[in-house]
Image (cartoon, coloured by chain):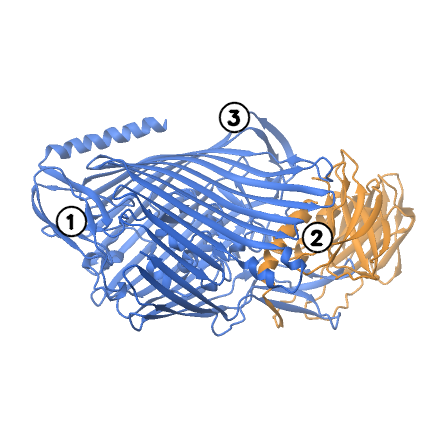
Chain colours: A orange, B blue
Amino acid sequence: MKSTIFNISVSLVISTFVFSSCKKVIDIDLNDSNPQFVIEANIINDGTPCTVDITKTINFSESNNFPAVTNAIVTLSDNAGNSENLQMTSNGHYTSSTITGVQGRTYTLNVNVDGKTFNAVSTLPYEVNLDSAWVQDLLIFGSNSYSVIPEYKDSSGTMNFYRFKLFVNDTLDKNIFLEDDVFTDGRTVTIPLFGEIEIEAGDTLRLQMMCIDKPAYLFFFSLASLQNGSTGAPANPVSNFSGGCLGYFSAHTLMEKTMVVF
Amino acid sequence: MIHSQIKVLLLYILSVNAVFAQSDKFTISGTIKDKKTGETIIGAIVRVNELSGTGTTSNEYGFYSLTLPSGKYNFIYSFLGFTQQDLSIELTQYKIVNISLSENSTQLTEVVVIAERKDINVTRTQMGVEKLDTKEISKIPVLFGEKDILKTIQLLPGIKSAGEGNSGFYVRGGGADQNLILLDEAPVYNASHLLGFFSTFNSDAIKDLTLYKGGMPAQYGGRLSSVLDVKMNEGNNQRFGVSGGLGLISSKLNVEGPIQKDKSSFLVTARRTYADLYLIFSKDKEMRKNQIFFYDLNAKVNYKLGEKDRLFLSGYFGRDVLSVAKTFGIDWGNSTGTMRWNHIINQKIFLNTSFIFSNYNYKIAFNSGNNDFSVTSKIRDWNLKQEFQYFPNPNNKIRFGFNSIYHTIVPGQITASEASGINEIKLQDRYAWENDVFFSNEWNATDKLSIIYGVRLTSFSALGKGDYYSYDANGNVIATTPYSNNEFVKTYVNPEPRLSASYLITPVSSVKVSYGRNIQNLHLISNSTSTTPTDLWVPSSKNIKPEIADQVALGYFRNFKENKYEFSTEIYYKDMQNQIDYRNGANTQANDKIEGELLFGKGRAYGLELFLKKKVGKFNGWIGYTLSRTKKSIDGVNNGNWYAAKQDRTHDVSVVGIYDISPNWSLSAVWVYSTGNAITFPSGKYSLDGQVQFLYTERNGYRMPAYHRLDIGATWYRKKTATYESSWNFSCYNAYGRENAYNINFRENKDDPTKTEAVRTTLFRWIPSISYNFKFK
C-alpha cells in the first residue's frame, strides 16, 4: 500500500511535466563487465517442484542470449529434515523431485558452481486468500483507463508481504506490483494495481497473488525502484543470497483469478 | 546559560562603549530610505568627505551609525541608482539624521554610478557573496517568462542548477538541501513549486537577495553549503500603488500603500498559475476533471512606533494542488510568518527581535471505492531570534545574539474512515530544540586590511516523546529506548568559527581569504532523481550525527576602466563530514525506522570560479566560469571508494548579455554550458523474472551528455504616463532547440526484443513566452 501511494504521488507530479517531453533512442558507449551468476529460485505451495534457473550476465551491447550455467550443484533442504540435490532438467534449469512447498516451512538453497558457494533461506508464508479481483475504470492523465483491483483480507497481527503478477492476454505486465500491510494490517484490502500495458475492453486478464517473505519483498522492492526510475542512485537489487551473486530465492504461495474486461 | 552569556557580552560591550564615550567622540545615526516609496535601503553608503576610507553602510533595516571625533564634516549618502545626497554637519553632539534618497530618473544602466558603491566587490570584506539586483533579474529571459530569482542566481559562478528548468541549486558541491533559504528570516523548507520548475519566490515581492557561498557571517547557521537571504518589500508608505503582470503560465498582482503616511504601510502580492486552465481545452473529457496549479501570497505590514521603534509583520503562504478525477489528490506548501521589532537602544546599538514561524506540509488524499483516506506530514518551527548590532566606532561593527528554535516533525499520519480498507496510523512525531549564540565583529584593522571574525555556537537536542532506536551494521533495530515528553535524547554542541579577511592591494584590487565551519542538524531524506513534495526532513539523533563542513577560500578581486568592469576569481576547498546516503533499495517513505535505511560518509569539493562583469553602459552583462569537483565516500556504497557526486560538473559556464537599444527596447540573451551530471548507468544485463534486468557495477561511473542552451528575450517599455507604465516581455527558452537530456533510461527494443537500447527524454525545446507587466501609480 505504502509504496503504491508514494509512487503514484511522485509519478503524478513528474508526469504533469513530462507529458510535453520528447523521447529519442540514442547511442551510449557502456563499459563491459565481468560475467556474474544470476540465480532465480522459487518454491510454491501448490505441489509443483522447486525450480532454480542459473544464468550469467552479459554486456549491454550483446544480444539477449543469456548463457545457462550447467555445471552447478544445487542442494535444497527444509526445516522438516528433508534434503535433496536438484537435477538439471534443461539447460541451466534445476528442479526438485521430492521436496515441495509447505506453508510455514523454511527452505535453504545452496548452489555450488566454479568453486563459489551461494546460500539463501526463504520461509513460505501462510496463505492469504485472494477473495476476488475486478477491473476498475479510472483515468490518470489519460495514460491508463483501467486498473485491476485484487480483494483480500490481510491477516491481522503479522507482517505480510504480497506480490502480484498481471497477465494481459497472456502477456506479462512488466510492472512489479508489491504490497505490504503497514497501513492495512487486518483489513480487507482493495488497492488498485496500475499496469504498464493499456487494458482494453475484451482483454482477458489473469491476476496472480503471491504471499512472499520479507527478504523476497526487499529484493522485488529494490528491483521495482530501478524499473520505475524513482531511485537517484541505481544499484543492483538486494539479494537474499550470500556469496555475491544476483537474484533471489523465494518460497511463496500462489493464487490466481481470471477475468474479462467489459 | 545563554542568557548569562549574553549578559557577559553585553557587559563587555557596554564597558567598551563607556571607554569610547569618555573620549571626545560623537555618533551620527539614522535610517536611510527611498524618498518615493519610503522603503528602507539596505547597503546604502555613508562616507565622510574629510576622512578618506571612513564610512559605513546601512544594515538590513536601513539603519546606520557612525562614531567620529567631534568636528565639522561633509557626509555623502549614496546608493546605486539613486542621486547622492551631501550633508554638512557640525558633529559636536549625538545626532540622528534620517535620509531619503531620490531614485535617479534616468535608466539604471545609463547612470554613472556613485564611486563608492562601484568598487564594493573589491572593498567588501565578505567573500563568496553574491547579490542580485531585482531590476537586473527582470530583463533576463527565463522559462515560461516567469521571473525567478532562484533561477537567475544559478547563472553566477559556484551556483549550479539542480536540473532542467529547476529552481533547486547546488552551491560549491553542496546538495540542494544544504542551502538555508530565508524569507524575511523564516526558513523555507521546500522552496519549489511543481517539482522545482518554479520557485516559491514571487520576484515582485522581493526587495533584496544575498547568497553566501562560503565564510558566512556568524548570524547565519543551520545548513552546510550556503545561505540565501531574501527580504520582502515593505510596502510604499508614501502613496498607494497597484502593479501586476499577465503571463502564459501565471498572473500576479501587487498592491501596496501607506496605512498612515510616513508611518506605516502594507504590501500584498499574489500569484496564481493556470496550467490547469489548459486542461479545459483538452479533447479528453476526463482530463478536464484534473487539477494542477499553485498559488502564493506574500503580505507585509510595517509600523513605525516612534523614532526608535519599528514593527514588521510579514507572511508567506503558498500551495500546490494536483488532483486527478477527484479520486486522487496531493497538495503541499509552505507558510511562514515573521514578527519583527527593530529598536534603537541608543545611537550605537541597534536591536532586532524576531519571532518566526515556518511550516511545510503535504497531504495526499485517496477517494476511490473503500480506499478513502489521507496521508499528511509536516515540519514546523517556532523560532525566537535576538540580535544586537553595535557600532562602537567607524572601525568596528559588532553583532551578537541568540536564536532558539523548536522543531516539530510529523513524518506521516494516516486518517481513514471507519469503512476504509486502511488503518489509521501515525508515525512517531519527532521533536528537536536548537539553541545558538553568535558573535562577530567587522574590523577595519588598517586602511587596507579588514577582517570579519566571529563564532557561532550551535546546540541541538533531539527531544522525546517517542521511541528511539539503535541499529546494527545492517540497519536492523537492535534496541528500542522510550523517552518521555521533552526528555533529552541526544544533544550535540558544535562551535562554528567564521573568518573573512580582505586586503586592498591597490584602490582597485584586493585579495580575500575566508574560513568557515557550518553545521547542519536537519537532513532531507530524498532518495529519488529529483526533490519531491514527499521528501522528509529528519533531525540529528543518536544515529544521525550533525553534518559538518569546513571551507577555505582564497580570492582576487580587480576592477578595470574606472570600475566599469569587475573581475573576480575565487578558489575553494570544502571538506564535509557525516554526509548521508541510502542503502540499496532503501524504503524512505512512511518508515518509522528510517534511520536504519541510511548510510554515512564524507565528501569533499574544490573548485575555481571566474567572474567578469560589465556593470554600466548600454551593453552590460557577465561571464561566469566554474571548474570544480565534488566527491563522496560512503561506507557501504561503491566499496567505500570515492566517487563523483551527482552534482559534480567539471565545467560550468554562463554568459549573460543585456543590450539597451533605446529607452523603449532592451534585448537580452543567456547562454549556459555545463558538463553532464555524474550518473549510474548499467554495465551489463541479465535475465530475471522473464525480463531483461540491468547490471550496475559502480556508483556514478558515467556522465550525462553536456548541457547547453541559449535563451533570448526582449522587453518593450511602453510610454510612461504620470499614473501608468507598462511593458511587454518576449522570450524564448532554449532558442536553438538543443535536445538536452532530462534523463536517460534503458529498455528492451520494442521491435527486436533481443536488443536493448538507451532512451533520452528531453523536456523543453523552443519554449516561447510572452508577458505583460503594468503599474498604476
Using the image, determine if residue B621 lies above or below residue A101. below
Q: Looking at the picture, tell me which residue is in the foreground, B653 or B665.
A: B665
Q: Are marks 3 and 1 on the same chain?
A: yes
Q: In the figure, B710 relative to B501: above or below?
A: below
Q: How many marks?
A: 3
Disc on res. B91: none
Q: Secondary structure at mark 3?
A: loop
Q: Secondary structure at mark 1?
A: loop
- What residue does disc 1 label? B54
Label 2–label 1 contact, CB within 8 A: no
Dot in front, 2 or 3? 3
User: Mark 2: which secondary structure?
Assistant: loop
Q: Chain of mark 2?
A: A
In the visual, does B231 lie left or right of A191? Answer: left
- Residue A17 found in image quarter: bottom right
Residue B741 horizontal/vertical position (percent): 55, 66
Q: Which residue is mark 2?
A: A244
Q: Is residue B673 left or right of residue B667?
A: right
Q: Is residue B239 above or below residue A79?
A: below
